[in-house]
Amino acid sequence: MGTGRTEAKDREPRREKGKLGRSFGLLAVLGVILVLAGLVGLVYTNVATLTSMFLFGWLLLIGGVVGLLQAVQSRRSNFFWLAVIVAAVNIAAGVVVLRRPEASAEALTMFAALLFLTAGLFRLVGSLVVRGSNFGLALVQGAFGVLLGVLILSNWPGNSLYVIGTFFSLALLFDGLSLVALGIGARRILGLVREDGEPAGAGAPGGVREAADKRRTGDQEQSNN
């Protein structure tokens, strides 16, 4: 009985370790898929732009329907009409994006350019006024934001079919790389851990020294006796 319980206890850490290893492996596989999707999107930026617009439209539409259902369920609350208005706006925006993806891409491209330009100007002015420890980095980031906003605005709306797709593909690429690094790194760390939760090298030189010290102590006690 005791041997069976001991074997069962020994199997549990191995199972948990196997589950964690498979989970981190799936995480790395998901990262590889995202990296491949990002690379394909960078090659076919117009397809990536239209795909991102359709995804954005469906997210708005589904979010609006869910918000409307939640508003109906809580119709006795004080924020009922506000929730209904927000849900209706989301549904209308989703329908517009799905019906006119090219025009929606132009509007989002303009919004992104103005956002880059405004954020870059604020960062530039803030870095010049404050002049903190990260003055150079903030200055470079501000100048890059202004330059990116100006470049997008100078070619708008002709560039609207690839700007959003490029940003979307880059986001997929970097997210995928981070997931791959996380999964591989976690599996390596997991491989260095023994089933009992201690590092794999914990019993190497230190354990040998401990055993040798114990033997010497026992030999000395026997010789003294």
Image (cartoon, rainbow, N blue to C red):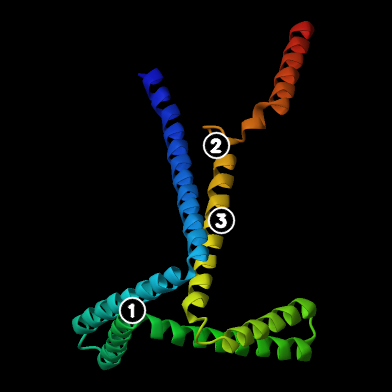
Asked whether the residues under the numbered discs 2 and 3 touch, taking CB atoms below 8 Å apart as contact, a structural biologist would say no
> Mark 2: few, some, or many residues within 10 Å (few <14, many ≥20)?
few
Figure disc tally:
3
The amino acid on which the numbered mark 1 sits, given as a three-letter code, is Leu
> Is 118 left, or right, of 37 in this rendering?
right
| Residue 89, above or below 45 | below
Q: Looking at the image, is mark 2 or mark 3 earlier in the sequence?
A: 3
Q: In the depicted view, which residue is nearer to us: 217 or 48? A: 48
Q: Position of residue 225 (x, y in %)?
A: 75, 6
Q: Secondary structure at mark 3?
A: helix
Q: Amino acid at mark 2?
A: Gly
Residue 66: x percent and y percent? 26, 76
Would residue 96 appear left or right of 195 to someone viewing this image? Answer: left
Residue denoted by label 3? 177
Contact flag, marks 1 and 2 (Cβ < 8 Å): no
Secondary structure under badge 2?
loop
Whole-angstrom CA distance, mark 1 to mark 2, is: 46 Å
> 201 or 148: which is nearer to us?
148
Considering every residue shown, the one lying at the far front of the view is: 158
State the residue position of label 2.
197
**Alpha carbon distance from label 3 to label 1:** 28 Å
Q: Which residue is mark 1?
A: 60
On residue 152, which mark appears? none
Q: Residue at x 31, y 85 (%)?
A: 96
N-term-proximal mark, 3 vs 1? 1
Q: CA distance from mark 2 to mark 3?
A: 29 Å
Callout 3, which amino acid? Leu
